[in-house]
Each structure stands twice: as structure tokens, then as C-alpha cells.
Image (tube, rainbow, N blue to C red):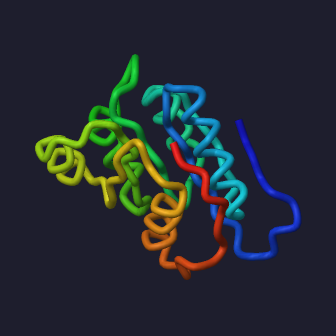
Amino acid sequence: MRMTVSGYTGQRRNVLVVEDDEDVRTLVEMILAKAGYEVESAANGVEALQLVRVQRYSLIVLDLAMPEMDGFTFLAQGRGVLQNTPVVVLSARNQSQDVKRAIELGAAGYVTKPFAAQLLLKRVAQLLGINATAPTATNVSW
């Protein structure tokens, strides 16, 4: 799925959201699209790996616990194609060993669920090297 917001005049950044929970995926897509990002999504690591092999993304938001291929496996198998693509893990898994493993596999950031929209947007902006105060989204949280 691809979402964009019309009328946004900033530099377009494309973000891939990899999340198996449809409600969470839709929420993250809406938050990012409202902030001016072009958003695509995948329901699991298998779909995401297929997408990153043919499309470059500015950033990936990645869940860890997914069917078919989890986020850890996606990071491990995608190392070659993800070299210059920052990955933000968005997961309910908040144990230190999970965070450490994700970072060791190449994740550049980690946000735990439930999350505040502003925190996710701030992390995304930081990793993309853009002003974290603009654009902003509503105070939606999950």
C-alpha cells in the first residue's frame, strides 16, 4: 500500500513500514503520511525483503514479531541491500537482549510499543538528518 499527503512541499522521503498487525500498520502509515512522508508497507519480512530488493527507501520502520519472517531475520538477510538504509525497530519487545540483537543486526533506532506519534516522528527525522520539529503530526498514540 502507498500513502501520501497532497500539498506537502518539502523533500519527499519514502518510508517502508513492515508490520503484521493491520491496525498498527495503518496507524503508522497515517502518522508518517500526515508528516509528509511517502509511505509503503509490507505485512511481514518476506514481503519487505522483496520490496527492498527492487526499491530504495529512505528509511524502514520494522516490527520484530511477525509471521513468515520476523524482523531479526529480515535484518540478517537484508544486510547487503540495507547498507545505507536506516532501520527503526518499532516493537513491543523491550528486553535489553532484543534491543541489543536488533542493533547488532543493523537497526539504527528502537522505539517500543505502545508509542507516541511524536517520538516515532522524532526518531525518523533524526535518522534522516532532517529538522525534528517539522513536519509534525497530531498527538495520536497507540
Q: Which of 20 and 56 is in front in this view?
A: 20
In percent of the image, x 56 and y 54: which residue is there? 56
In percent of the image, x 23 and y 43: which residue is there? 94
Q: Position of residue 96 (x, y in %)?
A: 13, 47
Q: Which residue is situated farthest in the top direction here?
A: 68
- Residue 116 drawn above or below residue 2: below
Q: Could you say which quadrant of the image residue 9 lies in?
A: bottom right
Q: Which residue is situated farthest in the left direction here?
A: 97
Q: Quadrant of the N terminus?
A: top right
Q: Which of 142 and 136 is in front in this view?
A: 142
Q: Position of residue 93 (x, y in %)?
A: 27, 37
In percent of the image, x 33 and y 59: which residue is there? 109
Q: Could you say which quadrant of the image residue 36 lies in?
A: bottom right
- Residue 39 drawn above or below residue 91: below
> Is residue 126 shown left or right of residue 132?
left
Q: Where is residue 95 in the image (x, y as percent from the top left)?
A: 16, 41
> Is residue 57 shown left or right of residue 29?
left
> Is residue 113 shown left or right of residue 48?
left
Q: Which of 31 and 104 is in front in this view?
A: 31
Q: Where is residue 20 in the image (x, y as percent from the top left)?
A: 49, 26
In percent of the image, x 50 and y 37: which residue is there? 18
Number of numbered markers: 0
Q: Nearer the viewer, residue 110 or 15?
A: 110
